Image (spheres, grey):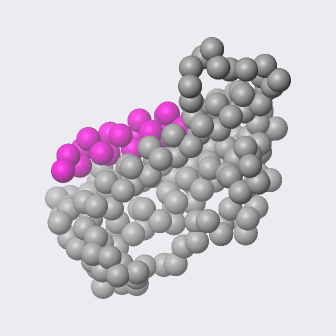
Amino acid sequence: MDAEGLIRQLALDGERIAALVAGVTAEQAQWRPAPEAWSILETINHLWDEEREDFRVRLNLILHDPAAAWPPIDPGGWVTARDYNTRDLAGSLQGFLAERAASLAWLRGLTAPDWDARVETPWGWSITAGDMLAAWAAHDVLHLRQLVELQWGYTAQLAAPRTTLYAGEW
C-alpha cells in the first residue's frame, strides 16, 4: 500500500471537493434530484461529520487503542437528525476543510504507523489500519462522483425543456 499516495489523495480531494461546490447558490446547494437523494449541502455536511467522527477517530483507535470500542455513528440518520439541508454551504465547506487539514496534519505526524494493525469491527469485519486509510480515500472519490452527478442533474433541470443529449450520454 502506498500510504503517502493515499494521504496525498486526501489532500487533493479536499481541494477537488471545494472546487466542485465553488459558486453554488443556496438554491442549488439544497436541490435534490429526488426526495430520497442527497443535496450538495447534505453531501458536504456528511463529509464534515465523517471527517471528524469516523475515519480519523477509528483509524486512531486501530493504531493506538485497538481494544477500545468504536463510538457509534449514524451517517445516513445524521442527514435529517442534524438538519444538514438547512445549513450554510460556505460554513459547512469551511468546517469540512478545517477538519481535513487537521486530519492531514495528524496523518503526516504519525510515526511509523503499523498499517497491518487489525481489529474486529462491531459488525464482525476484520479490518486493518491500511484498509481504513484506503477506505477513507475511496470514500472521498465516491462523494466526488456524487457531487458531479448533482452538478449534472441540476444543469439538466436548468436546461429543461431543452435537451442535453448533444453533450453526450450521462
| Drawn side of residue 19 relative to residue 142, left or right | right
List x then y, in percent, for residue 5.
Answer: 26, 41
Q: Is residue 28 above or below residue 71?
A: above
Q: Residue at x 65, y 38 (%)?
A: 150
Residue 11 inside the magenta-drawn segment:
yes
Using the image as rendered, state which of residue 122 and residue 165 is in the foreground. 165
What residue span does the magenta drawing correspond to?
1-18
Compared to residue 64, the image places residue 23 above or below, namely: above
Residue 2 showing in the rendered view? yes
State the quadrant of the C terminus: top right
Left or right, 82 with reference to 166: right
- Res. 91 in view: no
Report the number of numbered marks: 0
Q: Where's residue 97, x and y in %?
A: 54, 44
Which image quadrant is residue 81 in? bottom right
Please identify the residue farthest to the top as the structure is shown.
166
148 in relation to 70, above or below: above
The image shows residue 69, relative to residue 41, as above or below, that is below
Instruction: Please provide percent x and percent y for residue 8.
Output: 32, 39
- Left or right of 101 on screen, residue 39: right
Viewer-proximal residue among 52 and 37: 37
Looking at the picture, how far across and down is residue 56, in whole percent?
41, 62
Q: Decide whether residue 39 is among the magenta residues.
A: no
Viewer-proximal residue among 37 and 164: 164
Main SS class of the magenta portion in the image:
helix
Q: Residue at x 52, y 60 (%)?
A: 50
Q: Residue at x 52, y 46 (%)?
A: 143
- The residue depicted at 62 percent of the width and 44 percent of the height is 93
